[in-house]
Image (tube, rainbow, N blue to C red):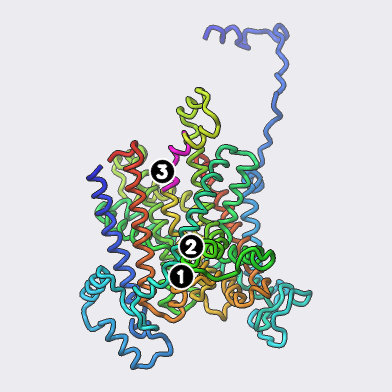
Amino acid sequence: MFAYVVRRILATIPVMAVVALFVFSLLYIAPGDPAAVIAGDQATPEDVERIRASLGLDRPYLVRFGAWVWDIMRGDLGVSIFTNLPVSTMIQQRIEPTLSLMVVTLLLAVSVAVPLGVLAAWKVGTWVDNAVMSFAVLAFSVPVFVVGYLLAYIFALELDWLPVQGYTAFSQGFWPWLENLILPAIALGSVYIALIARITRATMLEVLQQDYIRTARAKGAGQRSILFLHALKNAAVPIVTVIGIGIALLIGGAVVTESVFAIPGLGRLTVDAILRRDYPVIQGVVLLFSFVYVLVNLAIDLLYTLFDPRIRY
Amino acid sequence: MASASVLNPADVSPGSVKVAEPTRDIMPPVKVRKGLWGFMWRNPTIAVGGTILLLMVIMAVFAPLFWTVDPTALAPARRTREPSLEHWFGTDMLGRDVYSRVVYGARVSLIVGFAVALFSSIIGLTIGLVSGFVRWADGIIMRIMDGLMSIPSILLAIALMALTRGSVGNVILAITVAEVPRVSRLVRGVVLSLREQPYVDAAVAAGTRTPVIIWRHILPNTIAPMTVQATYVCASAMIVESILSFIGAGTPPIIPSWGNIMAEGRALWQVKPYIVFFPAVFLSITVLAVNMLGDGLRDALDPRMAKRI
């Protein structure tokens, strides 16, 4: 097992290297002079020259990449072209709202989706199952910002139950913090809930066919204990895997949800950076999100080996 | 087989043996509907999804015939009118007719959806085949694909769009790059499992050349999973397009697309929600139709997978 853990950790290195190389190269894949691309359409020649110098475009490509990676390892993600602040500082200022939104969404989604999937598998073929599956297809078909506007319109504007937009820092108190995150979390979580509910149902259907479930029934175990103790425990690995993979949906969706609900997080930072063509910021955010995504999935893979005695490598 | 000779009809004179009445069927005969109609009857999700999608395509192609006016015509005097008989879906903040913009906007969403599905299928198929057949390339290709897949796809498309000028072609390119890794992984998986099949072993043993094996044995078997995947890619591409346009990194504002109309309605959504509402409904129905088509095709093309996910 130790050898597996080491191999699995080492396997993330080439993945991260590809991500880094890709994010770095983006600027040079685009047609034209990278300095002019960054500077945008309204730039003066002096602006272009200044950016060219700051990128160090006079040095060879691989040397630049090496220097860039070295900087990143030391936590230096470059300097924003627009604000002239270090990108790492800008990310630090914006990380709390995004992290809060994601954690709330994750908790909400898992606590809703898993019981929903179990229910659908238990009542397979009935209207309950059909309703859950129809919800799932619907959730996959409506863009996250549309769900956001719909929820905000109904629950904030019409019913006035929750604030329409904005974010309150966690340090200002738990309820004001949570109040602002409920609607965004439901909007962002809808696709994620659909994804987890579908995989939970599919895996549970498979597990419920197993002999040990029949044995459990025969020995007189109750329905709830069969579903949640015997079956769900054995269906956990694919479900947890999808929860990990689905974080990509959360990251992509957060960018949009933060725009809808005016949450000053990393998503808003990204959108603003795009409109200003602030490329170092975009690179920094993409890199950060991708690394977090890779590390979360690494952690999940490693947890299996600890918690599931059936997995031996 | 002694009894066979006893009942040999040649030995029995007519009338000497009483023939039993044919047993009545307990079940009524199964009515088999043939042709396209029968296929639709057996696969209602394909029928419903396909019909809605077809209607949207007709609407997009013949947009000028659907009682539309010029979707880019400005009329500042008639800004933000509520939906009425004259302007079915109202007008936006520049006085443009939202109904006409929504009808014309179908073009962008459908073109992006279909083009991304087509291109990512072709590229993904090629990469998947190479990866499945060329040992030394497999490791390199799959590491690259793993890397690309670990960048959340919307973020990848956003990063690509941030570099280029907003145009429909660039949107298609950006979303295709984000979708290709998933398709290639799928094709590679199918190819690797097909290579273990006895009929492929037999073809190898018979001395069939690799290109012929790929053409005759591998490719036809990738079509079914590829088609299903392509519909899902199409659905997700339409959503990503709207998201890109919505945050201002998609198609240029001059071209009406569902995402653009919603992006323009954003500033006014609290007072004039209909500007966001109508394109949202059209987009969601279209994506729903494509998703239904995908689910239906999956069940129809691979009965073993049916009823699972």
- Do the CB atoms of the residues marked 1 and 2 lie less than 8 Å apart? yes
* Nearest to the observer: residue A95 or residue B153: A95
| Mark 1 or mark 2, earlier in chain | 2
Q: Is residue A189 visible?
A: yes
- Tell me the quarter of the picture where residue A95 sits: bottom left
Q: Residues within 10 Å of mark 1 (few under 14, many from 20)?
A: many
Measured from the top left, where is residue B269 in percent x and y? 64, 73
Q: Is residue B57 visible?
A: no
Q: Residues within 10 Å of mark 3 (few under 14, many from 20)?
A: some
Amino acid of disc 2: Leu
Q: Which residue is mark 3?
A: A237
A150 is higher (above) or lower (below) than B264? above
* Spatial CA span between label 1 and label 3: 32 Å
| Mark 2 or mark 3, earlier in chain | 2
A185 is higher (above) or lower (below) than A25? above
Judging from the image, mark 2 belongs to the subunit labelled A
Same-chain status of marks 2 and 3 = yes
Residue at horizontal 43 percent and vertical 61 percent from the top = B179
Amino acid of disc 3: Val
Q: Residues within 10 Å of mark 2 (few under 14, many from 20)?
A: many
Amino acid of disc 1: Gly
Q: Which residue is mark 2?
A: A101
Q: Which residue is mark 1?
A: A265
| Mark 1 or mark 3, earlier in chain | 3
Q: Which residues are magenta?
A: A230-240
State the SS at label 1. Answer: loop
Q: Main secondary structure of the magenta part?
A: helix
* Spatial CA span between label 1 and label 2: 9 Å
Magenta stretch encompasses residue B268: no
